Image (spheres, rainbow, N blue to C red):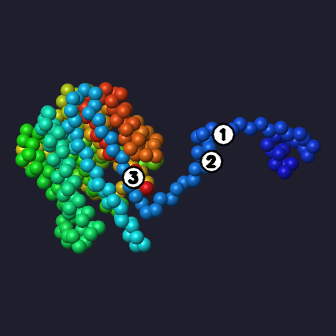
């Protein structure tokens, strides 16, 4: 013990030394670090938050969002299932909001019917013959048809993620975005904007900074509701686990920088609180557009 005290207080310490040590109470954050044990989450699961706002410069909301989330776990299986969709309508009052609502509902209902029912209640339906990527593409095409029929003159983006186990299949049209957020500090966009300015950036004609103030930054060359035939972007990836998936309209990512999106997504235990903070940040930046966000926290 004496040797130990010598190392801390110097060689003058001895058995007869009268040592007076003053301590200060730990702060609340220090107490959390000392007492909080890392929870082991089993089975793997998805915690979901959503946020939405009309913004500060619009008089109505043309965005729509949809999510459906479930889990099945027993001694041999651990299956997370989730459908997450953000649609940003275009075309003015009624047209844009109808288009986004129809598109998100049509795709969500189609994927639930084709995948969720046979997976979790095999007696209801037989498994689909199509691959998951084919189902996602067919669902978006069905949404396109529904928009053309029920919202003529309107249009919408659609960005969707279908999680099944450790895999996500992304279906994307327009300029809403899906991001992966990793615990090591990375935030990566997994969709590419179908916009004029994105194409100009890819061609090297303008820079990222110039794109932010470009007069045609909201012009899309691909969206649901357009008469020209197109194929949605479809990709399957391994989910970040642990990590986050963020899906949002350009009313969020166009106003809030990616490093701030990362900070807000990871600073709160509850994804719903994080989404509220993101919406607040976009509104504080001016809120020129509708804002929609889904945040999926993956354990």
Query: First in sequence: mark 1 or mark 2?
Result: 1
Q: Secondary structure at mark 1?
A: loop
Does dot 2 land on a helix, a strand or a loop? helix
Whether residue 153 sits left or right of residue 56 in the image: it is left
Looking at the figure, which quarter contains the C terminus?
bottom left
Residue indicated by mark 1: 26
In the picture shown, does residue 173 fall above or below 207? below
Q: Is residue 222 above or below residue 57?
A: below
Instruction: Give the answer, above or below, for where 141 lies relative to 250.
Output: below
Q: Disc 3 marks which residue?
A: 47
Q: Measured from the top left, where is residue 170 in percent x and y?
A: 26, 53
Q: CA distance from mark 1 to mark 3?
A: 31 Å
Determine which quarter of the picture holds residue 38: bottom right
Q: Are marks 1 and 2 in contact (CB under 8 Å)?
A: yes
Query: In terms of sequence position, does the residue under pointer 2 or pointer 3 come before the other?
Result: 2
Q: Residue at x 12, y 38 (%)?
A: 95
């Amino acid at each position: 013990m004496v040797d130990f005290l010598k190392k801390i207080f110097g060689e003058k310490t001895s058995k007869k030394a009268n040592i007076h040590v003053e301590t200060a109470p730990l702060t609340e954050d220090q107490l959390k670090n000392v007492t909080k044990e890392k929870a082991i989450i089993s089975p793997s699961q998805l915690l979901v938050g959503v946020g939405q706002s009309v913004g500060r410069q619009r008089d109505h909301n043309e965005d729509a969002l949809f999510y459906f989330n479930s889990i099945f776990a027993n001694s041999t299986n651990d299956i997370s299932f989730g459908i997450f969709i953000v649609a940003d309508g275009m075309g003015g009052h009624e047209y844009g909001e109808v288009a986004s609502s129809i598109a998100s509902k049509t795709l969500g209902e189609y994927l639930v019917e084709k995948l969720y029912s046979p997976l979790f209640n095999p007696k209801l339906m037989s498994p689909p013959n199509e691959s998951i990527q084919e189902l996602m593409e067919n669902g978006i095409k069905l949404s396109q048809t529904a928009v053309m029929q029920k919202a003529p003159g309107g249009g919408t983006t659609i960005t969707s993620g279908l999680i099944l186990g450790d895999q996500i299949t992304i279906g994307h049209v327009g300029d809403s975005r899906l991001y992966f957020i990793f615990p090591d500090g990375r935030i990566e966009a997994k969709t590419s904007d179908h916009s004029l300015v994105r194409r100009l950036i890819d061609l090297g004609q303008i820079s990222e900074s110039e794109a932010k103030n470009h007069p045609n930054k909201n012009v899309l060359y691909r969206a649901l509701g357009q008469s020209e035939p197109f194929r949605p972007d479809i990709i399957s990836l391994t989910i970040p686990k642990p990590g986050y998936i963020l899906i949002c309209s350009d009313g969020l990512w166009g106003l809030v920088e990616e490093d701030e999106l990362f900070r807000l997504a990871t600073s709160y235990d509850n994804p719903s609180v994080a989404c509220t903070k993101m919406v607040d940040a976009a509104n504080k930046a001016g809120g020129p557009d509708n804002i929609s966000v889904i945040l999926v926290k993956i354990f």
